[in-house]
Image (spheres, coloured by chain):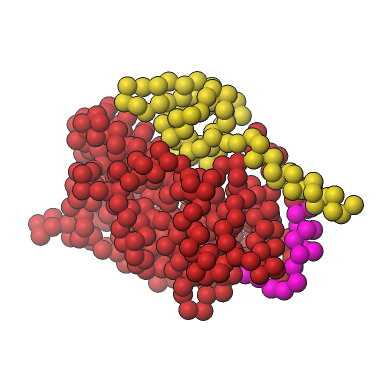
Chain colours: A red, B yellow
Amino acid sequence: MRFIDEYRNEADARKFLTAIGRLVTRDWTIMEICGGQTHTLIKSGIDRLLPPQITLVHGPGCPVCVTPLELIDRAIVIAQRPEVIFTSFGDMLRVPGSPQQTFEVSQTSKVSRGAQDLLSVKARGGDVRMVYSPLDAVKLAQAHPDQQVVFFAVGFETTAPGNAMAVWQARQLGLTNFSILCSHVLVPPAMAAILGAPGNQVQGFLAAGHVCTVMGTWEYEPLAETYRTPIVVTGFEPLDLLQGIYMTVKALEEGRWGVENQYTRAVTRAGNRPAQKLLAEVFEVSDRQWRGIGPIPASGYRLRPAYAAFDAEQRFGVAGVTAQESPLCIAGQILQGLKKPHECRAFGLQCTPEHPLGAPMVSSEGACAAYFSYGRT
Amino acid sequence: MCLGVPGKILTLEPNPVGMTMGKVSFGGAAKEVCLAYVPEAQVGDYVLVHAGFALNTLDEAEAMEVFELLKEMGEIDQ
């Protein structure tokens, strides 16, 4: 496939590895932001082929992983309602909610959470459907005027334009039976939180190429300046990541900092203007809870007041549903890059992709799933 | 978050709500994609698609940069 196969060439990969090996004179710690990058690095074995002086730390760029547990619980409550068709991308369907608990939805109404995750709500007769695009959810709302269609809008900036378009389209069509459960997070505030944390070890970043396709690279310039850190925007194929690592190591070795773009075939400094325009129309920046990390100010999106009618949390009154984390799961430390998945005592034992304890084992972008699937035990 | 797949635009269908749709081919498998965010894209262009939306057109010239760098590194070796 064009624009993919050529970036997986093994001979070229080895050339980059050799070049990196020649550049390195001391230890460096580099974080890749996005779960998609983590997966390519582990699957292709780049993490094992890099010179030993380079330590890769996996970042929190897994939107499924950082979605607060109470949102999963709220999704489960909404999905159990008979009038609801609950739609979502595949990964969210398998993230376990809080262990057995009864939610008090109102003074007179208790919902028993017998279900473990959204997929088990489906197994018990709930109408839960996997979709590939939020526009599919809008189509469902048009096709089923007597049902309430809810879309679980989880993602970083890459996914936000599509969700904005779905909400905008729903408003154009005058739909009263479509809403989104919103869990949108932003990359730059997370990077700032990591860089600003006491004891931060990360010296360089591989920034997420598809986030930057939408938002551009200019937002990262103040970060690079303030923390004197090289930030290289990369694509997701093996050669992209290797070139990105090469560029980062070169900058570190030469004592340079700033934003560089490896993924120039898809990313410009300004980003996608039409997408940014609709994002600003539909969403506004808000504080957000990051599961395992805690609250990060101005780190997410919520619907603007003009679009508040499309907010599922308000429509279904689930703000009172609170969560309880599994005591065994160390997802928070994984997401901050403090521990690696195989250092978790539940890894591969109580926690596997078949019966996950937490989100990083479920998500196709989760570090734990990557380590398990590609044999890093 | 970031599963974006390159595909080639086969058809363009402008629509009254201004949400241009189109058929995009991914190595032979064609899917319906919203092209509203790539208003300059033409049939035959490659776009990066995520969750049913084209987010950018792919620049062929820039795509070669990776291989230009490899060539330069190879020349330094010799």
Q: Please give the range of residues in magenta.
A: A14-29
Q: Is residue A106 above or below residue A170?
A: below
Residue B58 seen in this snapshot: yes
Residue A129 placement (x, y as % from top left): 36, 39
Residue A154 placement (x, y as % from top left): 38, 49
Q: Is residue A344 above or below residue A313?
A: below
- Of residues B18 and A308, the one nearer the viewer is B18
Residue A339 seen in this snapshot: no
- Of residues A69 and A23, the one nearer the viewer is A23
Q: Quadrant of residue A168?
A: top left
- Which residue: 52% across, 66% down? A225
| Residue lying farthest to the left in this orientation | A108
- Of residues A181 and B43, the one nearer the viewer is B43
Left or right? Give the position of B75 relative to B10.
right
What secondary structure do most residues of the magenta stretch adopt? helix
- Of residues A151 and A225, the one nearer the viewer is A225
Q: Quadrant of residue A297?
A: bottom left
Left or right? Give the position of A325 relative to A21.
left
- Which residue: 39% across, 55% down? A185
Q: Is residue A159 magenta?
A: no
- Which residue: 48% across, 63% down? A222
Residue A61 placement (x, y as % from top left): 48, 57
